Image: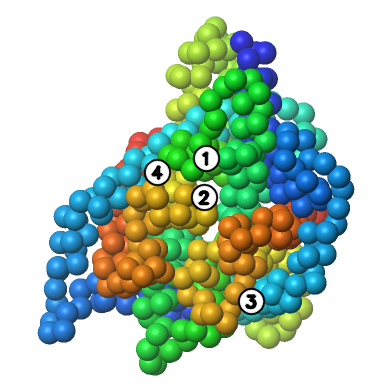
Amino acid sequence: MRGERFLLLPGLLFLLLFFGYPLFSIAERSLAAPEGLTLARYAKALAAPAYLEAWRNSVVFATLSTLVAALGGLFLAYWTSKLPLRWKGFLMSLYAIPVSLSGLVVAFGFIVLLGRNGVLNQIFASLGWPRFDLYSWAGLFSVFPFYNIPLFALALMPLLESVGRSLMEAARASGATPFQAWVRVLLPALMPGILAGSSLVFAGMMGAFGTALALTGFAKNLLSLQIYSLVAESTFDLPLAAALSVVLMASTGVGLYLLALWERRYRR
Amino acid sequence: MRGLGWLFFAFLLLYLILPMLAPVVYSFSRMWLDVLPQGFTLDWYARIARDPKYVEAGLLSLRIALMAVATNIVVGVPTAYAAYTWAGRAGEGLRRLLQVLPLLVPPLVVGLGFLLAFNRPPLSLSGTLWIVVLGHAALGFPFFFRTVYAGLAGLEVGLLMEAARASGAGLWARLRYVLVPNLVPAVLSGSLVAFAISMGEFEITSMVAGFGTITLPLLLFQSLREDFRAASAVAAVLLYVTLLALLGLTFLRRR
């Protein structure tokens, strides 16, 4: 229906105005100098030890979060897919909640459970175990899987439902051990879903800062928090924040590109 | 081995359920100093319902979310429809773009981009309500588009429109009598998604909002440090909003 293509106009205009123009502004401000252009901010973004450490922390944090989400999500999705239909429907709805919940509500929940005086910490104390520190790296790693695992599981479920069960049964029927069936048959078949889920988690973790800010403030050196502190704190420096955002997007882009390359090998 | 699997599955479910339950239980308990909470109370809800600061923030969040949803409907519905009917490479390209866009451009970058782009003519919006509304609309747009597009694909709307055209209906008549009635559930679903995103949004808001636009999540962030009781009620309210939106989505999907 050729005549209706003009209906695309409002959307294109919207994307241009609210994604294109802001991204252009970021690039422009990161390069702008009183006279002409400068790469000084990129030099700083890529050479200053604090930013290098932030960049490394972010990449490691996002990668490890992705691994945790992949292991937990794969297990959760597989175990859920084996349940009767009624339960499956209920659990899928349950997994949708953490994914769409405000990060601050999540932070509140974890403070109540694992904060300094948290319920679980009191139980640990009465058992004579050491107290768990929510406001540490381990703390952040205990919080973020709360949405990453269900996010990953939901991304994987459709594929698992369509191919998983029958493939497993076929593999077991032809005499494969459970381990062989998993590694040789199921995992390769699920790889596109696993890599799609990994992209969601990796990209999300590279940019996330709200929950971390609510829990640890600026104590943990992540690239996203560095950018936010340059925007919102007394260290106000928007052009430098712009350069760091370009670095952040480029790093996320490289990660996503590698995952896409990997995914291509499994596409038929 | 199987028993161990069940145990780990139960542990994962507890891990997902307990942090959601905690704000709700906390918001209804008089005291929670030991392992178990003590006493039932509605005081913390009364505290935020009587405090104009919280009421205003709640109403503001609601207004922003509704405006962001309206923006998404006006812009997103024609776009999803055109991308769907325009089957070739261009429609597919747009779909791909909107799938990658929220991954490559996180809320943090949307917020910074808005600050830099809209603090000067021709579009100076900084400090206004509109910069928050449009920020939320931009953040929700890919998700709104995806939901409406999926609804269209499930309904064979293209076929219906083709049939209406073959029977001589003009564009306007086709939109009015074929597209809109078929589209309503998909648009409602998309609107609920965009609404839920906007109501809980903290990251973009905290970057672009002026002193005059304190939304409920911004207030929750303050309350986490200053008034943990009030914070529990606000967190619980935000949780209820998400639950209602998801219930609505499930209901629409069942039909």
Residue A236: give x, y in percent of width and height: 33, 72
N-terminal of the pair, mark 2 or mark 4, is: 4
Whole-angstrom CA distance, mark 2 to mark 4, is: 17 Å
Residue pointed to by mark 2? A215
Whole-angstrom CA distance, mark 4 to mark 1, is: 18 Å
Q: How crowded is mark 3: few (under 14 residues within 10 Å), some or many (20 or more)?
A: many
Disc 3 residue type (three-letter): Ile
Which quarter of the image is occupied by the N terminus of chain B? top right
Mark 2 residue element: helix
Mark 4 residue element: helix
Whole-angstrom CA distance, mark 3 to mark 4, is: 31 Å
Residue pointed to by mark 4? A62
Residue under the image location 30 percent in, 72 percent down? A237
Colour approach in the figure: rainbow
Q: Is residue A119 above or below residue B161?
A: above
- Judged by depth in the image, the label closer to the viewer, 4 or 1, is 1
Q: Is residue A215 above or below residue A163?
A: below
Which quarter of the image is occupied by the C terminus of chain B? bottom right
Whole-angstrom CA distance, mark 1 to mark 3, is: 33 Å
Disc 1 residue type (three-letter): Leu
Residue pointed to by mark 3? B64
N-terminal of the pair, mark 4 or mark 1, is: 4
Q: How crowded is mark 2: few (under 14 residues within 10 Å), some or many (20 or more)?
A: many
Q: Is residue A152 above or below residue B79?
A: above
Q: Check residue A209 in the rendering and tell me which mark sits there, or answer none.
A: none
Q: Do labels 3 and 4 share a chain?
A: no
N-terminal of the pair, mark 2 or mark 1, is: 1
Residues under numbered marks 2 and 3 in contact, where contact means CB atoms less than 8 Å apart: no
Chain name for mark 2: A
Instruction: Locate residue B223: give its quadrant.
Output: bottom right
